Image (tube, rainbow, N blue to C red):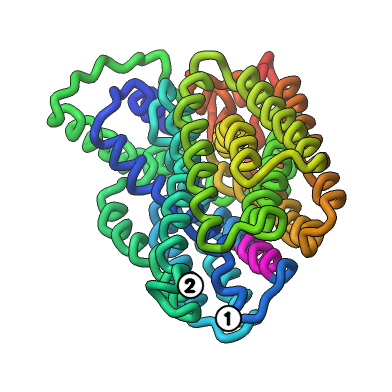
Amino acid sequence: MSQVKEVRSLVPARMDRLPWSRFHWLIVVGLGFSWILDGLEVQIVAANGYAHTLGMGPVEVGLAGTFYLLGQVFGALVFGRLADSLGRKNLFLVSLAVYLVGSAVAGFAFAPWFFYIWRFVAGAGIGGEYAAINSAIDEIIPSKYRGRVDIAINGTYWGGAALGAVASMFFLNTEVFDQDLGWRLSFFVGPVLGLLLIYLRRHIPESPRWQMTHGREEEAERNVDAIEQRIREEGHEIGPVDESRAIVVKEYGRVPFLVIAKVLFRQYPRRTLVGITMMVTQSFLYNAIFFTYALVLENFYDVPPASASQYFIVFAIGNLLGALVLGHFFDTWGRRRMLFGTYVLAGLILLTSAFLFHAGVLNATTHTLFWCLSFFFASAGASAAYLTVSEIFPLELRSQVISYVFSIGQFVGAIAPTLYGSLIGDGTDRGPLFWGYVLGSGVMIAGGVISGVFGVSAAGKSLEDIADPLSLVEQAKGGVTPDGAVPEAKGSSRRE
């Protein structure tokens, strides 16, 4: 049996020392645009312009959201596994193509069952994007900027949601389009925008960190050389590499499921608890509110479907601003402190609005303002959930762990649209929805407490300092070997 070659690598140190440049903006736009597409998709479905044509009531509209979310679960699991074994870049165009087809075909729906199938397909494409792209972004962006950039990118979901609201106002306006035609055209907005990403992604390199751990050290070094040359040509100076940051790694290959289980539940059980908790809580709350907000405005405040989009634009902008404004503090004040604050504040504000809603003292405008304030904080915390899961586990299984935790969160969250759609009813009784809001508030507050107590202090640290790669040779430090054995930790703080 041939011996696996060991290599000394400075790839992580070289990537983390890079100054911010146009290259990094390319990564942000080329990869981060997926969240805009997701927000666009969800908003167009939430506007439920198709409901009349397809004969769908509140529960059926909620079910459309559930199928989309279940599709995301399927896509994340499939593409997440492939992204760790075949590379990040190889999955970009595939997952994007799946989304483009699924969204476009849904625009031709003639019955609810047909609509559900293709919403599932579109969700599978977006789910694949979440797993592969979160990994690539965190592996390429310098550690100094990783928190704010990741949170801002995930927060652009709400830019897409706002775009979807504007599109809904236009396409659902029966003075401009026939009722049966407008909603169909709206489903082609995302695919048209998605086609533009194909060109951008051709110029995005494979993750050098992924290459480093898959027996492609020479490719990784050439890759970093090209990135550094590109940044120098932009006029930036690049400092020397700290040789003491070198690591010795060897090719690891495909990670067995047994190894993944041992990493998650034996080596890092608290991190697994934090990741699952964050994903479940934010997914449940967002899906509960987001997929049914139009129904709430229409049934309780008599807001027509086209006008409901106007209220949502304000709501989406509040979410976007939360991620953009608060993201910086995750790098300066720290992850745990900010996770606790954003989750708990969001839950308390939503709880306050629940009591006011039940008392009947809110109108469409004031209810929307409470949502804006609550989700100003919630959006930063929800975006940080993806950041947290991506950075606290070993590189070789990063995409898969994202997909598993994301899938658990979405599976639980997928229940929310149908549940809250049934709680809304015909808008005559506020009691059921009030208790639904109380539940959502409690879930979010619990998530904040758990994240604050068990979270990981990762701000400004290299990914390899947060979690040892499985391929690390020097002093295994609590890592897991390819055969599934877990060696004794030698003073490592990264084994729980």
Q: Which of marks 1 and 2 is nearer the N terminus?
A: 1
Label 1 SS:
helix
Q: Between marks 1 and 2, how big is the CA–CA gap?
A: 9 Å
| Residue 481 % position (x, y) | 64, 38
In magenta stretch: residue 177: no
| Residue 408 % position (x, y) | 72, 50
- Please provide the residue range marked out in magenta: 61-71
Residue, x 44% and y 68% (percent of image)?
Answer: 173
Quarter-of-image position of residue 271: top right
Question: How dense is the environment of label 1, judged by Cα within 10 Å: few (below 14), some, or many (20 and up)?
Answer: some
Tell me, yes or no, whether the two marked residues, 1 and 2, touch with CB atoms within 8 Å: yes
Q: Which mark is residue 53?
A: 1
In the visual, does 435 lie left or right of 262? right
Determine which residue is flagged by label 2: 183
Hey, what amino acid is under mark 2?
Trp
- State whether residue 487 appears in this view: no
Question: Which one is nearer the viewer's eye here, 139 or 258?
Answer: 139
Residue, x 61% and y 64% (percent of image)?
Answer: 68
Label 2 SS:
helix
Hey, what amino acid is under mark 1?
Thr
Question: Which one is nearer the viewer's eye here, 292 or 271?
Answer: 292
Question: Which one is nearer the viewer's eye here, 76 or 465?
Answer: 76
Q: Which mark is residue 236?
A: none
Position of the C terminus by quadrant = top right
Question: How dense is the environment of label 2, judged by Cα within 10 Å: few (below 14), some, or many (20 and up)?
Answer: many
| Residue 336 % position (x, y) | 64, 20
In magenta stretch: residue 69: yes
Q: Is residue 323 above or below residue 18?
A: below
Q: In this view, does 444 lie above or below 142?
A: below
Query: Is most of the magenta stretch helix, strand or loop?
Result: helix
